[in-house]
């Protein structure tokens, strides 16, 4: 990734880390309980309306739009909100949900043929080790059922990542808005079925300001900004290059939960957080050797370079045919396209320029 895209991925990690405290505050306003599936429906209603009237449908098929909506939005957040309503702490939820990192890399290898480099794989392993340290440190205070539900949410997110990566939508924001339209009605229906019409009506009538603010934050910053950037990056880079940034989410989430909700991190959580940062550094802080998957623009640049290389070869051939190897221009072009010169080509090129 280049510096700009890495900074955007880091911004997404911060926004998503704050998301968990916002969700917790919205679900439990002044000791009350908001039906979790209704809360998700409220969030995505704000995502869709009025944006869908001003943002064009992304240039992907309806199958991809529905898939992202059901997996990355409805599945992930429906399960996450349910787990937090059942007692999953916000900080621990931000941690366990990052199991999607490993799941995404594995699913991408299986379904997209994206093999992570050794460096990326080592970074993910190190990050997962940090997650394990923190999880062990807090496993005794977390009920088993909410923990399993968050892991299911992580799997849903990972599957949504694969759908978004395969779709390669040019507009990440468009994909967020249009796929978000899949969420409100099904989850409202599930809430009516699970919680009952009376509980849903009471929650809507007695909605608290903190719940409204929470829904606004999660809709605007968590979904529109966060997933708009996220889906765009997944369309430009392999999943194994983008996903490791989310290892920073629990660091932000647990720190915020400590400051706002009084969830004091244990030594194990601090140690695990440091391992997470080390994993992110190992996986993503590397030279920008991965180029965006913009084949049309890249092919155009390569054609221009090929023409310039051919012209340079013609001029050199006319003036110094005995000094310049006939395949130097083509060799330099091939090496440039591959990202580096071989030692032999570099030596020949240096010798020619010195003449």
Image: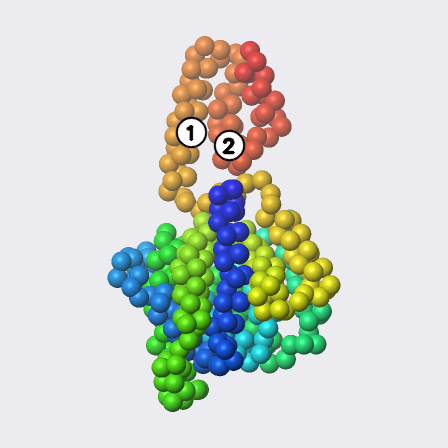
Give SS at disc 1.
Answer: helix
| Residue at the spot of label 1 | 305
Q: Is residue 149 visible?
A: no
Mark 1 or 2 closer to N-term?
1
- Residue 184 picture location, percent across and down: 36, 74
Q: CA distance from mark 1 to mark 2?
A: 9 Å
Label 2 element class: helix
Looking at the picture, tell me which residue is in the foreground, 29 or 176.
29
Relative to residue 333, is residue 217 depicted above or below? below
Query: Looking at the rendering, which quadrant does residue 213 occupy?
Result: bottom left
Please name whichever residue, 10 or 114, is drawn nearer the observer in this view of the structure: 10
Q: Residues within 10 Å of mark 2 (few under 14, many from 20)?
A: some
- Residue 36 x %, y %: 46, 78
Question: Residue sitting at 53 percent across and 32 percent down?
Answer: 335
Left or right of 148 on screen, residue 82? left
Which residue in the protein does label 2 denote?
Answer: 336
Residue 7 in sight: yes
Mark 1 vs 2: CB contact within 8 A: yes
Instruction: Determine whether 267 is above or below 204 in the image.
Output: above
User: What crowding class fits label 1: few (fewer than 14 Cα within 10 Å), some (14-19), or many (20 or more)?
Assistant: some
Furthest-right residue in this view? 267
**Residue located 52% across and 72% down the image:** 24
Residue in the image at 37% along x and 36% along y: 300
- Give the image location of residue 69, x and y in percent: 40, 68
How many callouts does the rendering have? 2
| Residue at image coords 54%, 61% | 17
Indicate which disc residue 110 carries: none
Query: Is the C terminus in the top left, top right, bottom left or bottom right quadrant?
Result: top right
- Using the image as rendered, state which of residue 189 and residue 309 is in the foreground: 189
Residue 37 x, y percent position in the rendering: 44, 78
């Amino acid at each position: 990734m280049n510096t700009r895209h890495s900074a955007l991925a880091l911004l997404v990690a911060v926004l998503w880390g704050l998301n968990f405290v916002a969700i917790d505050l919205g679900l439990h306003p002044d000791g009350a309980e908001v039906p979790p599936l209704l809360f998700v429906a409220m969030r995505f209603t704000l995502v869709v309306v009025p944006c869908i009237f001003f943002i064009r449908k992304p240039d992907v098929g309806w199958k991809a739009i529905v898939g992202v909506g059901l997996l990355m939005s409805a599945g992930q957040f429906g399960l996450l909100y349910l787990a937090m309503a059942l007692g999953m702490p916000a900080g621990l939820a931000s941690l366990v949900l990052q199991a999607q990192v490993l799941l995404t890399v594995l699913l991408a290898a299986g379904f997209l043929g994206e093999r992570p480099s050794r460096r990326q794989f080592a970074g993910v392993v190190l990050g997962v080790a940090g997650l394990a340290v923190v999880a062990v440190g807090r496993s005794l205070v977390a009920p088993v059922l909410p923990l399993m539900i968050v892991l299911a949410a992580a799997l849903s997110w990972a599957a949504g990542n694969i759908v978004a990566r395969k779709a390669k939508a040019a507009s990440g924001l468009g994909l967020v808005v249009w796929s978000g339209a899949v969420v409100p009605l099904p989850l409202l229906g599930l809430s009516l079925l699970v919680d009952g019409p009376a509980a849903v009506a009471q929650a809507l009538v007695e909605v608290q300001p903190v719940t409204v603010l929470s829904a606004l934050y999660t809709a605007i910053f968590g979904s529109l900004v966060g997933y708009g950037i996220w889906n765009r990056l997944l369309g430009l880079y392999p999943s194994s290059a983008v996903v490791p940034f989310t290892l920073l989410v629990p660091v932000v989430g647990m720190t915020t939960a400590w400051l706002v909700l009084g969830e004091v991190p244990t030594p194990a959580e601090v140690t695990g957080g440091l391992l997470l940062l080390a994993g992110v550094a190992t996986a993503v802080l590397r030279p920008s050797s991965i180029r965006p998957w913009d084949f049309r623009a890249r092919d155009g640049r390569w054609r221009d370079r090929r023409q310039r290389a051919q012209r340079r070869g013609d001029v050199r051939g006319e003036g110094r045919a005995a000094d310049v190897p006939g395949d130097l221009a083509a060799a330099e072009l091939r090496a440039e396209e591959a990202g580096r010169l071989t030692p032999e080509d570099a030596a020949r090129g240096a010798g020619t320029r010195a003449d």
